[in-house]
Image: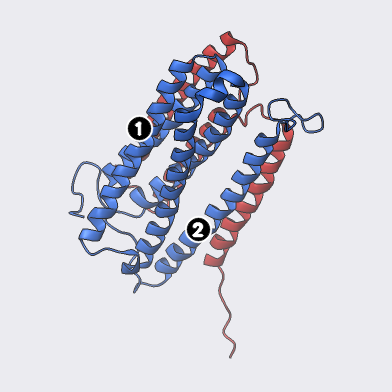
Chain colours: A blue, B red
Amino acid sequence: MEIPYTVSARPDTGLWNAKIGIWLFLASEVMLFGGLFSAFVFLKLGADANPAIKWGGDLNTLLGFINTLILIGSSVTVILAWTELKLRNWKKYQFYMALTIVCSLGFLVVKSIEYYMKFSHGIYPKTSTFYSIYFTMTGLHALHVIGGAVVLAYFWLFGYKMYKEHPEHLANRVEVGGLFWHFVDLIWIFLFPLFYLLSTTSSIFGGSPAH
Amino acid sequence: MAHSDSPEAIRKSQKFYIKILVWLIILTVVTVGAHELHFPVPWNWIVGLAIAVVKAALVAMIFMHMLGEKLMINRMMAFTLFFFVALMGLCVFAYWDHVAPIF
């Protein structure tokens, strides 16, 4: 059965189906993370009002900075992969998509190192309100990175058959996956300064905590 | 995403994306630089979040093509953004909320 408007735009909205679908999903994601950002604000303001509550932690700014660069880079590689697909350059598409997946793995490796360093020093979500919101938000974000990477890896590994039969279908799917990936990048753009810069006293040049 | 599918327009947009990448890297370095300067509160928060908003706007407008996207999508996201800002506003307003003593 042929599903209408998978490639062509609907006459009433001017958009194809998945485009509306992904944007509605992203709108719900904004509110999901919005709830957590508001929790962050409440906890921070509560800590400011109560001197007994210690706010902030010793996060490794350099690792956060590296992860920011990795995600920003992957945002560009995913859009370059999509443009190469539009140009019907399969090899270049695969190259840029592979780079995106490598970036996502790199991000997760750095994040795992950070978590390992924290756990090995006895720092867990229960340690403080700061670490509870830190682990919750960065953990949920990491789950999004994993989800996005799995989808993009699927298009990278198994997209060739669709590319041969309906290249525009694959381009649309990669576009939708790319939009999600940009959103993941966008969330990190806020997480990085909130946790690694504004809630820590450590410097990127050292003077960094042991954990 | 792109609104012109001609090969020339796509190749041109690729160069533009690389330029945006450079700007995003510069802004990230500026954010870290501002952190190292140790601005007093609340200026450190204002500077840090202002740069983050600019970076997020670049990603949303250029990479996600909200600039030039169909009106329906922009309205939908403006609606979402309104409620997000309202949610943050409620949190911040609570900071200045003083409960009067009952007795």
Label 2 crowding class (10 Å Cα cut-off): few <14, some 14-19, many 20+?
some
Q: With A168 as the anchor, is A120 left or right in this view?
A: left
Q: Is residue A114 above or below residue A128?
A: above
Q: Nearer the viewer, residue A145 or A89?
A: A89
Q: Is residue A78 above or below residue B4?
A: below
Q: What residue is disc 2 on? A: A36
Q: With A4 as the anchor, is A150 left or right in this view?
A: left
- The residue that appears at 41% across and 48% down in the rendered structure is A142
- The residue that appears at 43% across and 43% down in the rendered structure is A145
Residue A37: x and y in percent read 50, 56
Disc 2 on helix, strand or loop? helix
Residue A99: x and y in percent read 38, 27
- How many numbered marks does the figure carry? 2
The answer to whether the residue labelled 1 contacts the one labelled 2, judged by CB atoms less than 8 Å apart, is no
Q: Amino acid at mark 1?
A: Val
Q: What residue is disc 1 on? A: A102
Q: Nearer the viewer, residue A130 or B72?
A: B72
Disc 1 on helix, strand or loop? helix
Q: Is residue A39 visible?
A: yes
Q: Amino acid at mark 2?
A: Leu
Q: Quadrant of the C terminus of chain A?
A: bottom left
Q: Is residue A73 above or below residue B85?
A: above
Label 1 crowding class (10 Å Cα cut-off): few <14, some 14-19, many 20+?
some
Q: Is residue A71 above or below residue A146?
A: above
